[in-house]
Amino acid sequence: MLILVHPRVRLAAFRQSYWSPYPLPATVSPSVASQVHGQCRRRNPMTTDLYLIRHGEAVANVEPIIGGMRGDVGLTDLGRKQAELLEQRLRAEQVRADQLYVSTLPRALETGEYVARALQLPIQRDDDLQELRPGEADGLSVDEWRRRFGDPHSLLPTHPFRPFSPGGESWAAFLVRAGSALARLVAEHEDETVVAVCHGGVLEVSFYLAFGLGGTGNRVAFAPLNTSITHWRHRRGSNGQSEWTLVTFNDAGHLAGAGVPEESEREAVPTPPNED
């Protein structure tokens, strides 16, 4: 992962935790445990703690199908097991949150049901938390997508305004839509804890938003694990500018030592460059 530190973004690992770290098996070294947990401080007044949870493994992650609203048929059995372990973790830690938002794609909604039970919160559906919208490619096999529409991967890094397929989003449009959704959540819920069940692409967008990058900016690439937790803390500075602190990234401690694979075979909607 390449991270360019923006003046208004702080990377933090504090000892005192608001969202308690999950106890890892004794076989996990302290250094790895520290990386997984990313312990954080308690909230300051008028901040928003935003937890982004990636969905469990989806059918579209293991079958070569473009997983938009038409191609997404929900979680695999492994994905449900991952979501179950996530629910157990949230219950064991007695996590408290004020708001729960969930992408309206089936794989996220199914994961959101596990999270909602643990948090005892109603699901608030949010279309803008969806993964990049693939347009006419939705539901096609990856090979058919490439055959009919060419390979956008070869162009997206230098042509971020090219749609995924006719009727779909470009990388730049996706950044605007999903970034606006995240900005809206922190603006509407100051001094609250917000949980959003979403997608790997939306997690990536959170970095673009925090670092002030646009569609033509340098690529920030990483591979968040299924049901992993990423924690941002947002506050409004005295000059009115957003200040973001990355507290925890890609925390999937609930899967460690459980004999449950953490990584999927592929992305449900391939995003640039060369990630399928």
Image: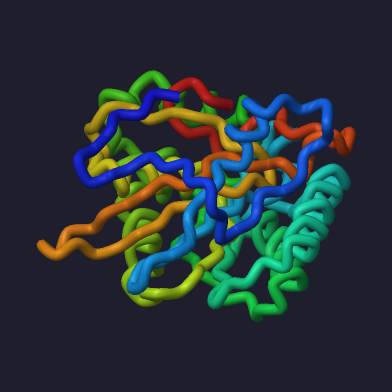
Residue 248 on image: x %, y % = 52, 45
Residue at image coords 34%, 23%: 155
| Quarter of the view holding residue 10 | top left
Residue 177 on image: x %, y % = 35, 57
Residue farthest along the left direction in this orientation? 239
Residue at image coords 72%, 59%: 111
Q: Is residue 75 left or right of residue 150?
A: right
Residue farthest along the front direction in this orientation? 15
Residue 135 visible here: no
Q: Nearer the viewer, residue 185 or 237?
A: 237
Can you say which quadrant of the picture contains the N terminus?
top left
Task: Indicate whether 29 appears above or below 76.
Answer: above
Residue 230 visible here: yes
Q: Nearer the viewer, residue 233 or 18?
A: 18
Task: Indicate whether 143 appears above or below 172.
Answer: above
Residue 216 on image: x %, y % = 23, 33
What is the total number of numbered labels drawn onto the structure image? 0
Residue at image coords 54%, 53%: 16
Can you say which quadrant of the picture contains the C terminus?
top right
- The scheme the figure's colours follow is rainbow
Q: Is residue 214 left or right of residue 256?
A: left
Q: Nearer the viewer, residue 191 or 179?
A: 191
Residue at image coords 26%, 54%: 243
Residue 80 on image: x %, y % = 83, 52
